Image (cartoon, rainbow, N blue to C red):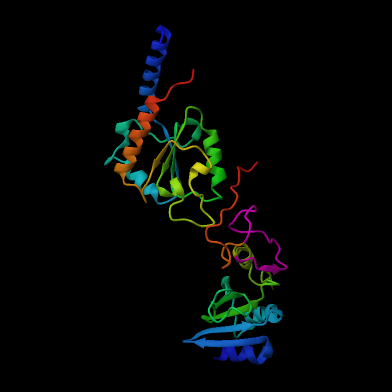
Amino acid sequence: MPILDELRRRFGDAIVETADHRGELTAVVARDALPGVLAHCRDEAALAFDVLMDLTAVDYQKFPGREDGPRFEVVYHLYSIARNHRLRLKVRVDEDDPSVPTAVALWPIANWLEREVWDMFGVRFEGHPDPRRLLLYEEFVGHPLRKDYPINRRQPLIGPAT
Amino acid sequence: MGVGGFFTSKLDEAIGWARKYSIFQYPFVTACCGMEYMATACSHYDIDRFGAGLPRFSPRQADVLFVVGTISHKMAPVLKRIYDQMTEPKWVVAFGVCTCTGGFYDNYATVQGIDTIIPVDIYIPGCPPRPESVIDGLMKLQDKIAAQAQRY
């Protein structure tokens, strides 16, 4: 596909892996190159990805065949209204240093989406203007969508706000 | 029991009888159980027959707190505050399994039974409970109110 070819040509080794599954395009990007790739996707006239549809993460800790690799993958779903095409970008993140550069400057919606990923997976976003939990409360211990979070762990009850 | 004891016990009965037929509830509705609550409150099942037909949407005017639906950890402080705002005498009904025990939400977000936060008088199980169960629970609550010793 032209989009993936274009990305590979421009960013070279920073594009770790690409896939084209029935027209669904995926590119795995090296973490250091991520801000440049995202900015290019948004601003390049041929790509024009003006919408960040979703930003989420996957925990591969117990995934068959992926136990040894980087534990997390942060996933960006991009969509272009003008060109009506889509692209999925992934960044692999190690458990020891679970952080990714923020995309808030490119798409303001990334603010809340990144807060949700921090809340649920404990992946930090460097440069985020407001890195608080989004859905859970401040007293919550841990990140519940991590695969090693016990399903029936009880959290301390919180009292009325004073 | 002396003459005074006779009169206070009869007064207890009279107050209990009056209270059990003038239940003003506060419906704390958070989830799907609310549908069954509405069905119970409407004309087909008609809890007005039991004197419980007028929900008050201020906890300060209510006698019975109906906790209807799943309570998350984030909602728990709100529920506690609503309970604290109600004036004595007050009663609490746990409506549906989520409020009784957490139901099938055995996870990080859900309070495992509202009796971990506030005292509960009547538990109505069911997911959601049918209106007949609700009326059964309401009648049990009425018996409890009628039999309750009053504080003067």
Task: List the single residue furthest toward the front.
Answer: B1
Task: List the single residue furthest toward the left.
Answer: B44
Residue A92, position as x, y percentages in the image: 63, 78
Magenta: main secondary structure equals: loop
The number of discs equals: 0
Residue A27, position as x, y percentages in the image: 59, 84
Q: Which residue is drawn at the image coordinates 52% and 58% (left, top)?
A: A152
The magenta stretch is: A121-142
Classify residue A9 as left or right of residue B135: right
**On screen, residue A133 above or below A74:** above
Q: Which residue is drawn at the image coordinates 56% and 61% (left, top)?
A: A150
The reply to whether residue B53 is in sight is no
Residue B2, position as x, y percentages in the image: 41, 8
The reply to whether residue B117 is in sight is yes
* Quadrant of the image occupied by residue A131: bottom right
- The quadrant of the rendering that contains the C terminus of chain A is top right
Q: Is residue B5 magenta?
A: no
Residue A74, position as x, y percentages in the image: 61, 74
**On screen, residue A101 above or below A30:** above
* Quadrant of the image occupied by residue B121: top left
Q: Is residue A129 magenta?
A: yes
**On screen, residue A37 above or below B45:** below
- The quadrant of the rendering that contains the N terminus of chain A is bottom right
The answer to which of B84 and B105 lies nearer the viewer is: B105
